Amino acid sequence: MDFTWPAELDDLREQVDRFVDELADEFDVVDDSWLVGHDPAFAVRLAERGWLGMTWPVSWGGGGRTQIERLAVMERLLERGAPVATSWICDRQIGPVLLEFGTAEQRRRWIPDMLAGRSAWCIGMSEPDAGSDVAAIGTRAVRDGDDFVVTGQKIWTSGAATAQWCYLICRTDPDAPAHKGLSELVVDMSSSGVEVRPITDSSGDAHFNEVFFDEVRVPATNLVGQLNNSFGQTMRQLEHERGGIDRLVSNRRLFLDVAALADTGDPRIRQEMAAIESRYRIGRLMVLRNVVGQGPTGYSAVTKTVCTELEQSVASFAAGVVGAHATVTGPVAGPGADIGARVARNIVYSPAYTIMGGTTQILRNILGERVLGLPREPRPRAA
C-alpha cells in the first residue's frame, strides 16, 4: 500500500506552515492547544483562510472539501501548537451535529458565526454522578409554555468560561428508561441562572469548569433533534469527539522537541523513541480509518484508547529525558529553553488524557461489547 500524501495535501500542510510562521510572534506554542489555546483572534484568522467548516456543505457556507483535507490542515495546526481552542469544539462536532440534526432555522442562526470564527461553544455532558455514563445524566429540563426550565449541574465542561453557547444534554422525561428521556438543548451562557466556576487543575490550567443551571429558561426552539430521544445523537457527537486527530497529536510537538534533546547513544532511549513513533503511526492510521469512513460503528473507542495511552507514554518519555528539570519551571540548556516547564505541565496533566471524553475502562467495554460483540460477564446472583 502507498501511504504517500497526494501533492495537494502536502501543499495544504505547507500553507499551514507559512500561515503559522507569519503569526509566530502573536502566539506562544501551546501543548494540548485544542484544549488550552484559547485565542478568539486566531479563530477569526482561521475563518479568513477557509479553515473552519472545511467539510461542511457549500449550501450552508461551508468549504465542501474532503475530510482528508481537513485532517491535513488540523493535524499540522496541532503539531505546530497553534491556539485553536476557541473554534475547535464548533468545528469538530457542534457544527456537524447541527447540520445533521438541527432545523433549517437553527442552522441559519448559528452556523454563520461558527464559520466566521466568532462563536465559542462548550458541551454540557459530564455530571458529578454521570461521568462516562451518559445514560445517568440527571440535569432536568421541564417544559413550561414556550420554554424549557433547566436545573442541574455539569462538570469538566471544557471552555465554558469563554463560551457563548452550551450544547446541553439533559433529561426531559425522568420516568423513561435510562437511555430514553434525554434531549439536547442549546443554552445561551449569558442566561439568568447560569453560573460557571473554573476548575484549576494541577498543571495550572483552568479550561475545565463546573456549570450550574438554576431554573434557566431556554426557548423550546433551541431543542435540537427529537424530544426524549437524543441518545443516538449524543453517541454520534461522541464519534466526532473521540476519533479525531486531536487525541493523537496533543503532545506530539513536545515529543519531537524532547527527542531532539535525548541521548540517542543510549540504546534504551532509542528503543523507547522507536516504540512511541511506531505507536504514533499506528494511531494515525486508525484516525485515517475514521476520517475516510472505513471504521465500524463504535471504532472511535479504539482510536481514542490507543491515542490517549500513547499521549501518556510521551509524557513519561519526556520526564525521563528532561529529568530533574521537569520538577521546576527553570529552563534546560540548549535547544528548547522552555522545555522543562512544558514537560512539568505535561507530566501532571497526562492522567486526564485517558479520562476526559470517556475513560479508557469504559471505552474498552464499548469496544468489547459493541464492536467485537463479546458477551457480558453475568452478574452474580444475590445470596
Image: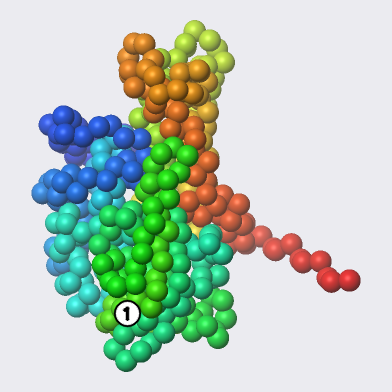
Residue 239 location, quadrant = bottom left
Q: Residue 134 vs residue 168: left or right? A: right
Residue appearing at x 48%, y 51% in the figure: 356
Residue 236 location, quadrant = bottom left
Screen quadrant of the N terminus: top left
Furthest residue to the top?
265
Screen quadrant of the C terminus: bottom right
Residue appearing at x 55%, y 70% in the figure: 136
Figure check: 47 above or below 119:
above
Q: Residue 77 vs residue 363: left or right? A: left
Query: Toward the viewer: 114 or 188?
Result: 188
Residue 100 location, quadrant = bottom left
Residue appearing at x 45%, y 28% in the figure: 344
Furthest residue to the bottom?
145
Q: Residue 72 vs residue 179: left or right? A: left
Under mark 1, the amino acid is Arg
One can see residue 300 in this view: no
Figure check: 201 above or below 141:
above
The percent position of residue 148, horizontal first and vertical second, equals 35, 83
**Count of all numbered marks drawn on residues in the image:** 1
Query: Toward the viewer: 250 or 324?
Result: 324
The percent position of residue 342, horizontal first and vertical second, equals 39, 28
Residue appearing at x 39%, y 52% in the figure: 198
Local crowd at mark 1 within 10 Å, few (<14), some, or many (≥20)? many
Circle 1 sits on which residue? 217
The percent position of residue 202, horizontal first and vertical second, equals 47, 39
Secondary structure at badge 1 equals strand
One can see residue 152 in this view: yes
The percent position of residue 82, horizontal first and vertical second, equals 25, 38
Coloring scheme of the render? rainbow
